[in-house]
Structures are given as structure tokens and as C-alpha cells.
């Protein structure tokens, strides 16, 4: 006979316990209910795993990124539930997201274009919609294109993505433009990505976007784009 504690900790066919799966699937709107479930299962004997801790960090990072646009009616109870998750799994709370004020110089503290792209994404990209500055938008476009091609296999690729890439070339020409060789390379990369295929091109565009932003630290206000994504 299987005991209650052993039953709730049993692995499913994917190799996850019920709690691991619940945490892995948790989105911002699920945080309150997930905290209640976690409390019950942990009290019933479920063992905390490294995968669960990783999920708590992901949940926290995702919530902080979207905090600004989160439904204010549910903000306080979600905040309390998130703090409860940190306590239950002994995970340090994720720092509140610091965003750019749209006026001061754009400065990065990390080294290497990958880390800088991530830092600029957190600093300049809103919870939803277009960025307020051209600097933020070149980071947003290259990030979205990279995700769609590399992580989503281009299943949502459409003319809006093509418009985004065409606008990217225009943005690269503003302020202090990319040098002629890099700008020509960017045009070639955009053409190669026309159908949403390519493995190396998105990363290179992300790198060029970082180079352009670092060369243009003074914010340039973004005019309403013609693309909808």
C-alpha cells in the first residue's frame, strides 16, 4: 500500500512530481493558487528539489518583469503569495526590476554582448507593447525575432516580423549609425531571415543591436511603428 506522502511525491511519466510540474507551469496569474498547493504538498511530505527552486526563481523573475502591467486589483495578494513561495522553498526574493526613465543616458554594467542584451532587455522593454525609445525597440525586435526563430521554430512568422526587421535597418541608421560594413551585414541578415529561417542570423542581429545601443546612449524617442507585434 502506498502512503499519502509517497503518493504525492511520485514521479509522473515526464519524471516530475506533481509539485515540480505545477511550479514549472506556473504563470503570473497562477501564483496565488500555486502557493496554496505548494504549502499543502510540502506539509504532506513532498521533498523540495533543485528543479523546484529553479522554478521559483523563474516565477519571481517573470513576475517582476511584468509587475508594472500586472492587474493592480490582484497585486497585493499575488505579492504575498510570491513571498510565501520564496519562504517555502528557501529561495532569496528576486530583486525588483529597475527600468530606464526614458531620459538619462543608457548605461550597462555587464560585459559581453549576450549579457548586455539581457541587461538592456530588462532595462528598456515594457511589460507589453513597443519600447518608448529606439534603443529599447532594437533590443525588443532582435529578442522577439530570436525567440520566434530559435525557440518557436518560426510557427508565428508573418509579414509583421518582416516589417519589424525592415524597421530595424532604419533604426540602425539613426543617431550614430552602425559602420557601413556592419549596416551592410545587417541588411544581408534581414534578407536571409525573410522567411523566418536561420540559426546564426538572429544572434548576430542581437549583437549588432547591442553595438548600436552602446554607441547611442542618449535616448531617441520611438515614433509609432507601422508593425503591430
Image: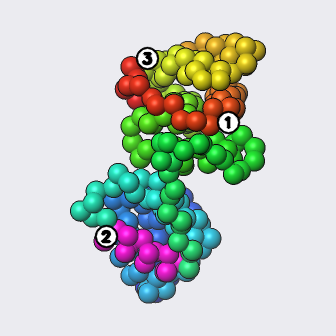
Secondary structure type for disc 3: helix
The residues bearing labels 1 and 3 have C-alpha atoms spaced at a distance of: 29 Å
Q: Which mark is residue 214?
A: 1
State the image coordinates of residue 50 (x, y, percent, origin top left).
Answer: 62, 70
Against 3, residue 51 (above or below) is: above
State the image coordinates of residue 26 (x, y, percent, origin top left).
Answer: 42, 60
Against 97, residue 173 (above or below) is: above
Q: Nearer the viewer, residue 180 or 28?
A: 180
User: Earlier along the polypeptide chain: callout 1 or callout 2?
Assistant: 2
Q: Which mark is residue 64?
A: none
Secondary structure type for disc 2: helix
Q: Badge 3 local density, few (<14 within 10 Å), some, or many (20+)?
A: few
Residue 54: quadrant of the picture: bottom right
Question: Is residue 83 located in the magenta-colored stretch of the structure?
Answer: yes
State the image coordinates of residue 141 (x, y, percent, origin top left).
Answer: 52, 30
Secondary structure type for disc 1: helix
Q: Nearer the viewer, residue 189 or 27?
A: 189
The residue that label 3 is drawn on is 159
Q: Which residues are magenta?
A: 77-89
Q: Nearer the viewer, mark 1 or mark 3?
A: 1
State the image coordinates of residue 75 (x, y, percent, origin top left).
Answer: 31, 65
Amino acid at each position: 500500500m502506498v502512503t499519502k506522502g509517497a503518493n504525492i511525491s511520485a514521479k509522473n511519466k515526464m519524471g516530475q512530481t506533481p509539485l515540480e510540474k505545477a511550479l514549472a507551469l506556473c504563470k503570473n496569474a497562477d501564483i496565488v493558487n500555486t502557493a496554496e498547493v505548494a504549502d499543502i504538498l510540502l506539509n504532506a511530505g513532498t521533498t523540495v528539489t533543485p528543479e523546484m527552486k529553479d522554478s521559483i526563481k523563474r516565477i519571481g523573475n517573470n513576475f517582476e518583469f511584468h509587475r508594472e502591467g500586472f492587474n493592480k486589483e490582484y497585486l497585493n495578494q499575488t505579492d504575498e503569495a510570491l513571498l510565501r513561495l520564496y519562504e517555502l522553498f528557501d529561495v532569496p526574493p528576486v530583486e525588483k526590476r529597475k527600468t530606464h526613465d526614458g531620459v538619462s543616458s543608457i548605461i550597462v554594467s555587464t560585459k559581453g554582448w549576450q549579457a548586455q542584451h539581457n541587461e538592456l532587455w530588462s532595462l528598456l522593454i515594457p511589460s507589453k507593447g513597443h519600447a518608448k525609445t529606439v534603443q529599447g525597440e532594437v533590443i525588443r525586435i532582435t529578442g522577439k525575432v530570436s525567440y520566434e526563430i530559435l525557440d518557436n521554430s518560426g510557427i508565428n512568422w508573418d509579414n509583421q516580423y518582416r516589417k519589424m526587421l525592415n524597421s530595424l535597418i532604419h533604426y540602425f541608421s539613426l543617431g550614430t549609425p552602425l559602420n557601413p560594413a556592419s549596416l551592410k551585414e545587417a541588411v544581408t541578415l534581414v534578407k536571409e531571415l525573410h522567411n523566418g529561417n536561420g540559426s546564426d542570423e538572429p544572434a548576430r542581429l542581437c549583437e549588432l543591436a547591442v553595438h548600436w545601443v552602446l554607441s547611442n546612449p542618449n535616448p531617441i524617442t520611438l515614433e509609432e511603428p507601422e508593425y503591430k507585434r
